[in-house]
Image (spheres, rainbow, N blue to C red):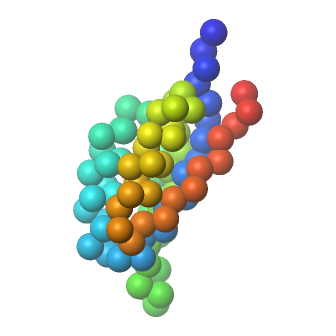
Amino acid sequence: MDSKRIAVAAIVIDEQAAAVEVNNVLHDYSDIIIGRMGLPYKERGISLISVALDAQPDVISSLTGRLGQIAGVSVKAAISKK
């Protein structure tokens, strides 16, 4: 049985210096990324990234956990039930 799930991760980068580290982590998980969209919001000095994923829940949690450890970064994931 395939236990993979579809998910979307919402990433908020409050400190632009963190963007390089975020991109490095996303590169490490590039095999599970379906697509991504980044929105720089210059007026507020933040960046928003949404990432669509196809992976097992523990891998999704690993990715969001690594991203959440980066200073100036907030992340939440919504995971499909099937």
Picture quarter with the C terminus: top right
**Residue 64: image location, x then y, percent:** 47, 48
Picture quarter with the N terminus: top right
Query: Is 15 left, or right, of 41 in this rendering?
Result: left
Q: Residue furthest top?
A: 1
Residue 32 figure quarter: top left
**Residue 59: image location, x then y, percent:** 47, 33
Taking the spot 32% from the left edge, 48% from the top edge, the residue there is 25
Is residue 34 visible to us here?
A: no
**Residue 73: image location, x then y, percent:** 42, 66
Residue 16 figure quarter: bottom left
Taking the spot 59% from the left edge, 50% from the top edge, the residue there is 77
Taking the spot 33% from the left edge, 57% from the top edge, the residue there is 22
As drawn, 62 above or below 56: below
Residue nearer the viewer, 6 or 35: 6
**Residue 61: image location, x then y, percent:** 51, 41
Q: Residue furthest bottom?
A: 43
Residue nearer the viewer, 68 or 77: 68
